[in-house]
Image (spheres, helix red, strand yellow):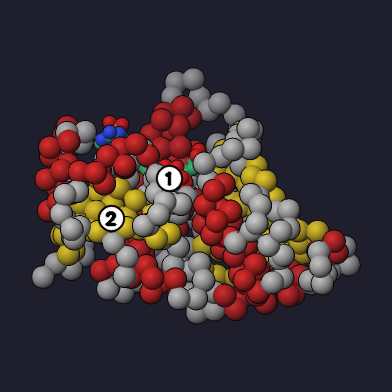
Amino acid sequence: MSTKIFIDGGHGTTGIEIADRLADRPELSLITVPEEKRRDADARRDALNAADIVILCLPDDAAREAVSLIDNDHTRVIDASTAHRVADGWTYGFPELEPGHRDVLANSRFVANPGCWPTGFLALVRPLVLTGLLPADWPVTVSGASGYSGGGKAMIADYEGAAGAPSAFLPYGLTLAHKHVPEMTRYSGLAHPPLFAPAVANAYRGMIVEVPLQLRAMPGTPSVADLHAALAAAYAGSPIVSVAALEDSAAMGNVSLEHVGATDRLALFVFGNEDRGQARLVAALDNLGKGAAGAAVQNLNILAGLPETAGLRL
Ligand SMILES: NC(=O)C1=CN([C@@H]2O[C@H](COP(=O)(O)OP(=O)(O)OC[C@H]3O[C@@H](n4cnc5c(N)ncnc54)[C@H](OP(=O)(O)O)[C@@H]3O)[C@@H](O)[C@H]2O)C=CC1
Ligand SMILES: CC(=O)N[C@@H](CCC(=O)OP(=O)(O)O)C(=O)O
């Protein structure tokens, strides 16, 4: 019997990407609502309750409303919005977070898909906190650039409208209160919020997330090789997350926003200078891939007991 899936918000940027990844999968059947009824609460309620698993690709308030429309005790939910990422009763949908987390996810009814920025950040930082190389109270900074599709239909219209792109490179989050900081703090295990300095680039998709570290100031003075070894061990054998060999990253002159292309891969790098005691940890991903749709499909596979990478672009 096939697993019934409904994507609420299926006509938006992330919803369309997810539907593409679910096409040609006979083990799944997609329940759809016509585009003109995408905001019709009755049509959505019917679809939400008919599904085994729903994926919410909605603004936060609409995601909360969708959950309230579910009046049965079995429909499982994967929410791509920010609404439930640090909420009680929800499991954070980053299977790679720490050993054992995938099993917790597999048995969860309510799953919050991570934000695109936290995906890169947590992949770089969580293993270092777990191994003690990065003290939990260390003042961590995270910066980077995202493609403009990260802002959904509204930002796409801004960048592709008649007036043209607002800028080639646009730092934002200048109040230092970006909505991703709570999930970055909680799931990294850091005692204090990281200083988050994001920017939007004039490119449709793609993302670079960077955490610079002054190693010589850190307790125990970890080496670049220590950091690399911890990340390589954390993701050994992963079909999705790769850690470039130190000799390969040492030979690179740059790393681009488009590094993984339109895929669901997450590529990690440790750039560093042992003499200077400095490192730049970098994650390259697609904000719409592992940063959104790829992660949602990976979580769907885990919930449904299907091969974890089925339908992913790797
Ligand atoms: N884009 C990205 O890279 C990422 C996005 N996300 C999150 O995923 C969610 C979806 O984002 P994204 O696809 O980019 O957004 P879009 O704006 O592209 O799509 C949102 C969709 O939801 C529909 N919608 C809005 N309000 C309601 C409502 N009240 N009831 C029913 N449908 C509604 C919209 O319809 P209409 O056309 O009428 O507005 C649209 O089809 C957001 O929470 C976003 O923060 C998470 C990670 C990355
Ligand atoms: C470029 C851009 O604006 N990106 C979005 C994040 C996209 C994302 O991860 O979505 P969630 O809203 O579901 O967390 C932002 O910074 O708010």
Residue with the mark numbered 1: 82
At label 2, the amino acid type is Val
Farthest residue, direction front: 88
The percent position of residue 135, horizontal first and vertical second, equals: 72, 65
Residue sitting at x 45%, y 62%:
94
Q: Quadrant of the C terminus?
A: bottom left
The answer to which quarter of the image holds residue 169 is top right
Q: Residues within 10 Å of mark 2 (few under 14, many from 20)?
A: many
Given residues 102 and 234, the one toward you in this image is 102
* Position above or below: 166 against 204: above
The CB of the residue at mark 1 lies under 8 Å from ligand 2: yes
Given residues 193 and 225, the one toward you in this image is 193
Residue 72 seen in this snapshot: yes
Residue sitting at x 20%, y 36%:
38
The percent position of residue 198, horizontal first and vertical second, equals: 61, 42
* Position above or below: 165 against 234: above
Farthest residue, direction right: 275
Label ID, residue 77: 2
Residue sitting at x 40%, y 54%:
88
Left or right of residue 147: residue 134: right
